[in-house]
Every structure is written in structure tokens, then in C-alpha cells.
Amino acid sequence: MDDLKSGSNLEKVLKAGHFALTGECGPPKGANIAHLKEKFAHLKGVVDAVNLTDNQTAVVRLSSWAASAIMVQDGLEPNFQMVCRDRNRLAMQSDILGAYALGVRNMLCLSGDHQKFGNHPAAKNVYDIDSMQLISLVKKMRDEGRFMNDDVIDTPPRLFIGAAANPFAEPFDFRIYRMTKKIAAGADFIQTQCIYNMDRFRVFMKQAVDMGLTEKCFILAGVTPMKTVGMASYMAKSVPGMEVPESLIKRLKGAEKGKVAEEGIRFCLEQIEEFKTMKGVAGVHLMAIEWEHRVPEIAERAGLLPRPVAP
Amino acid sequence: MIVADRKSLSEIQDMVRDCRKILLVGCKGCVTVCNVGGLKEVQVLAATLRIAAKIEGRPLIVEETVLERQCDPEYVEMLKPVVDNFDAVVSMACGVGPQFLSEAYPQQRFFPAVNTTFFGGAVAHGIWEERCAGCGTCIIHYFDGMCPVARCSKSLMNGPCGGSDHGKCEISRNINCIWDMIVRKKTEQGRLNDLLDIVPAKNWQTARDGGPRQSRREELIQNG
């Protein structure tokens, strides 16, 4: 890997060869900064960077760049998420500069959930560019110091560029190629969709290693501990592109009363243990949805603490 | 063709509630083909409006006619002898029709009886589907004749999003994932490599984003 592109903590941790751990935090449905800061406090010193979601599931929330800036003030490192659904190329470039100016150094480029799923289904969607083109755009801004139209940027944003990959969505055989394209477009790191089907993920990672992708890009395996049997069933049935094996649901059902969440965490810890030695996996992206307060415990039990201090 | 859906009876009734005499104008173009605004549909709507008015005890005269095309001044002109005999005119053509009629007869009021939905065709009896978004720069040859601009819910140019599910789009079980179809066809034809190049950002200037559009054919303008 070449010299530092952004100087972010996440970049340094990964380039130093450490097994990275990133977290995730959804900004509030309002301007309740106190609550947001509480969530941050649970994650401080526990993860290398924290994803700040961008109107996830197309539900209006405090903007991801503002939440990212607040996180910077609190001494944590944000991974600023941007989706293609809500902004055209003008707004995107402007927000990229704004976020960078406020101290953001990591950015995750996403297509975004369709607004049909959210709380403003009557909205007009944008999709001026897609996630692949957004990755290319951020790379161009950083490496060429130019906007999409080739105008020169006065002080380009130096960002560590992330992208998502879903090894479980259909058409399965194309998924590795889609990730290949994202890496070619300029992704420095990949965070995968929540993994539950380990068999399929092993196959996906073997493909990635065989194709040399893991030499070009850091792949962080996505995990979300199941809290309840209901959550597992919902994810299995109702979340597009999510694959939850029947065996996991059975295992959670078999847990003692009041111990389902613990069983979910155990499964998650077993996954992390395997990822640590799985060829090509550079870290874990822990998406503990509204469960930030359990992240320190999970990180501790996974043997991922203390986090490395980047030079 | 341009596909449309009939507005609800109550919406049409509300539009013409203050009228005693209206003209329903159908169109023999696209809306006839998609069974929404041709002769038959004009007759049905006219009869329905008459019966509804009768039930409500309101006097309402509804006359019917069908133009060859409402998007052509040559045919629009044919309404001239009768257009002022009515309190309002209800067009059953696509959104172009009532606008051409309004432009030709500024003194009259025109109402749309249909919602114009998309450019598409019939995929089965009674089912029409969108195929074209009229973006002004056709690129379907890159995708084996399938248009991701019109047919992907997110207009993605570089492959399927994470919501592609058993060949269906995440937003509805009734919508095919066009990227699943593109990938499948390229794979079957051994040309998956075509999809590995990054398709750059589209220039939307030729689409509606560039402002209302006009198509000029100089040779026709000169000869006209």
C-alpha cells in the first residue's frame, strides 16, 4: 500500500497492519445532540472510526456531516457516509469539501436506500450519479485536486475512501465483480453488509484474495449482533439483500429465556474470531444498531481492546 | 408509446362540477392503444358522468368526440367549430393533448381526464411497463438493450445495488431488477466483461434536467 492518502486514524491503523474495528452510529431524529454525544461516549477509544449514517433507510435524521463534525469535536474519528439518493453532484462536492473542512477524514460512498422505504416516500429522488461514480469523484477530488468538471480545487479534500459490498445480494456471481469495480474506482476500504451466512462469506473472501483485491483494498467484515429472535426473523424475511441462515434463527430460539441477546453476541464473537485469521479480512465493522452501549463489552470479549494508537 | 391511467371518476367530477355542458375529447394515438383515452373509453366516461350527474340530480350534457391526434395542430384545429359550445373540455389524451388544446383555444378551459405515466408498452394483456425515461441520450446498447436509467429504481449505471432479490427490485415484487436481467444476459452471452468498465457519470443536459426541450429539424423548418 502506498503512503497515507488521508492521514485518518483508520487509514493508519489499517496500514500499520492492525486488525481494525469500526463502529456505527445513527444521528438522531431531531437535534438532540446530548443523546448523540452519549452514544459517542460509549464508542470512544473502543473503535478506530465510527460510521455516521446518512438518512439511513430514507428516514430524515440530523445530517451525517454535522454529526461527523460533532464527533470530531468529541475526539472520535467519523466515517462520514454519503448516499446518492438525496444530492446531485453540486451538493455532493460541496458537502465533501464542507465535511473535510470540519475535520472529516474518512468517507463511505453509498447508493442509499430507496425513499420508498423511508418516512418521506413522496420525495423526488436524485441519483444524479451512482455510488461507483461517487467513489471516482471523491478520488478525483483528492488525487487530482479537481472537481468533476475539471476545475481546480483550492485545497483538495484528503479523504480515506470507503465503499460497501454485499456478498449476499443477488445476482451472487456478480457481487465480487461489483466490489472489484468499486476498488478500481478508488475505494481504499470496503465495509460489507452484515454477515450471517459464513459459508457464503468464506467463498466471497476466497474470490477476493484469489483476484488480488485484498492487496489493493482493506476489507472490513460487517457484523450486527442479533438482539432477539424477532430481529433475526425480520432481517431474514424483510430486509432485501440480507441473508440469515435458518440455523442461526434456530440457535437463537434455543437460547434460555432472557439469554437470546447473549447468544447473539456469542455468535458475533465467534464470527470475529474467525475473521481475525480469515485471509484478506482486515478488520470488523460492528453495526450494533441502537446498541452502542454494548460495543465496549463486545470489543473487550472479542479481544480487540485496547485499540492501537496510531502514530 | 405514451402510457396513461384514467383519473378517478370523483376527481373528474370535481373538475367539472360547475359545468352544465362539457365535451369529452379522446385521441386515436397512444391512449387508444393503451385503452385509456380512445373512442371506447370516451363513451364509457361520458356515460358514467351522465349517470352520476343524474343520480346527483344535476343537469349535465356530455358530448363526445375523438381526434386523430391531440398533439398535432392539424387535428386540434378540427375542434374549432364546436369548442366554444361548452363550459369546459375534458381531454382523454396524454398530458400533451390538453396543453395543445389550451394553446389553440385560449378562451376555453381544458381538463385532463388521465394521468400520463410513462413511455412503455404492453407486456401482457392489461399490463404496461415503463421502458424509456426520455433522457435524450440513449445508452441501452451498453446494457444489451435494457435501460437502467428508466428501469432501475435508482438509475444505477454500474451494476445492481444490494437490494436485488430473486430477480426483483427491492421496492416491489412486481418490478424486475433490471440489473439482474442485464447481468444474466451478459453472462449467458459470455460478455460479462462488458460490465466491468466503470460507466462515468451521465450528462443529464439532454434530459429534462437541461430545461424544457425542443427538437428542431432544420431541413423541415426550411421546407415548411
Image: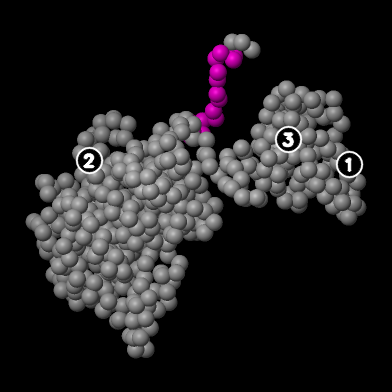
Does B44 sit above or below residue A61? Answer: above
Q: Is residue A148 left or right of residue B182?
A: left
Q: Position of residue B178 (x, y in %)?
A: 45, 49
Q: Which mark is residue B195?
A: none
Image quadrant of residue A68?
Answer: bottom left
Q: CA distance from mark 1 to mark 2?
A: 69 Å
Q: Which mark is residue B61?
A: 1
Q: Which residue is mark 2?
A: A142
The label nearer to you, 2 versus 3, is 3
Residue ID at (78%, 28%): B107
Q: Which residue is mark 3?
A: B27
Does A24 sit above or below residue B120? Answer: below
Q: Chain of mark 2?
A: A
Image quadrant of residue A166?
Answer: bottom left
Instruction: Please name the amino acid that badge 3 sits on.
Output: Cys
Q: Chain of mark 3?
A: B
Q: Is residue A234 left or right of residue B90?
A: left
Task: Check if mark 2's residue and mark 3's residue have beta carbons within 8 Å.
Answer: no
Q: Do marks 2 and 3 share a chain?
A: no
Q: Which of B112/A202 is in front? A: A202
Instruction: Please name the amino acid that badge 2 sits on.
Output: Arg
Instruction: Please name the amino acid that badge 1 sits on.
Output: Ile
Q: Secondary structure at mark 2?
A: helix
Q: Position of residue A84 (x, y in %)?
A: 39, 47
**Residue A247 visible in the current orientation:** yes
